Amino acid sequence: MWFVRDNMQRDFLALNKGEVLPWDRWGMISGKRDNPTPDELVLLEHIAEITVAGDAAFAEIRAFYE
């Protein structure tokens, strides 16, 4: 789950034109191989919902990022 958590966040950054590298640390990406906390899982679920909505949720994606 740590791998999914980290890559979901990298994908979200990339959708917002964030330039990230596999070894960058940002937000929940800590470099630790621990499982996401319950709070992180709620956040990841929201990120998943808005990113799969595509262009219809672009404004929400940008607002959540900012």
Image (cartoon, grey):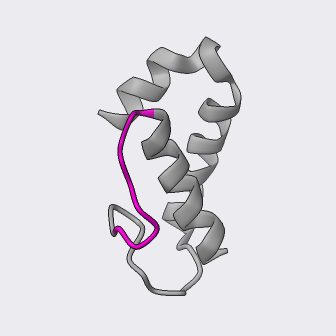
The x and y percentages for residue 31 are: 42, 81
Q: Residue at x 34, y 61 (%)?
A: 27
> Magenta span covers which residues?
16-24
Q: Residue at x 54, y 87 (%)?
A: 33
Question: Residue extending furthest bottom?
Answer: 33
Could you tell me if residue 43 is visible in this image?
no
Please, is residue 22 above or below residue 14 in the view? below
Q: Is residue 41 magenta?
A: no
Q: Quadrant of the N terminus?
A: bottom right
Decide if residue 66 is on the left or right side of residue 8: left
- Looking at the picture, tell me which residue is in the foreground, 17 or 1: 17
The x and y percentages for residue 60 are: 47, 22
Please, is residue 33 above or below residue 38 in the view? below
Question: Residue extending furthest top?
Answer: 56
Please, is residue 46 above or below residue 40 in the view? above
The x and y percentages for residue 47 are: 56, 42
Give the quarter of the image for residue 50: top right
The x and y percentages for residue 54 are: 65, 22
- Looking at the picture, tell me which residue is in the foreground, 51 or 15: 15
Could you tell me if residue 50 is visible in this image?
yes
Main secondary structure of the magenta stretch:
loop
